[in-house]
Image (spheres, rainbow, N blue to C red):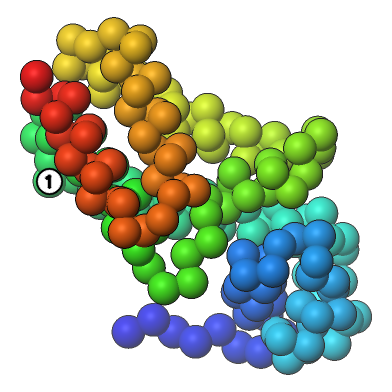
Amino acid sequence: MARTPVTGTPDTILTAAAGLFYQYGIHAVGMAQVAEVAGCGKNLLYRHFPSKAELVTAYLRLARREREQATAEALHWARGPTEQLIALVTEIAESTRRPGYRGCTFRNYLIEFPAADDEPARMARAYLTDSRALVDRLVAELGGDELLADRIWLIVDGLHSGPPEQAQVAVDWVTELVRR
């Protein structure tokens, strides 16, 4: 059973901020709103997270850990690059069907702040670069080329912005591409 964070701790504050940032967008959420939802005063919030940028960085770090854990779990039982690519896209497709899904956290950040060159933007870009590298590596192990990797990456991008009803289409399409 997961433990419930104690009010006023960094975990409680980060959980509150993550929910607000994901639902409303980072720009729309103020520190006062985070403090209110976290059930702490602004002084305590600023003691743990001296700036909104530091809170956003912690949020993206948490999101990355969660995505990497989900990816690792999806790939764990899949044998070989074919099954791993299908498992990866299946896991992403399933995540898009969850209630409240509002897109990829990292893509959302970069859409909201397209010209940003701060720590959160670098983290978002690094996550996407590393995710693409995973697709590239699996495709290379499969004996595929850059065009196949591009196609799979476009399908992944589409999953994050398309309607959840089409998630299975993405899985089927990747399955068809890698099992040729």
- Classify 142 as above or below 123: above
Q: Is residue 165 above or below residue 124?
A: below
Which residue is painted at 64% across and 59% down in the image? 59
On screen, residue 97 versus residue 21, left or right, reads left
Q: Report which quarter residue 125 is drawn in.
A: top right
Percent of width and height locating residue 175: 15, 34
User: Label 1, on which residue?
Assistant: 77
State left or right for residue 176 relative to residue 144.
left
Quick one: label 1, few (<14), some, or many (20+) residues within 10 Å?
A: few
Of residues 153 and 139, which is closer to you in this image? 153
Position of 173 relative to 167 (above/below):
above
Residue 154, percent across and down? 41, 30
Which residue lies at the image location 48% right of the left edge and 30% below the top edge? Answer: 130
Q: Nearer the viewer, residue 36 or 45?
A: 36
Looking at this view, is 91 or 9 the one in front?
91
Residue drawn at x 9%, y 19% as measured from the top left: 180
| Residue 24 visible in the shown view | yes
The image quadrant of residue 146 is: top left
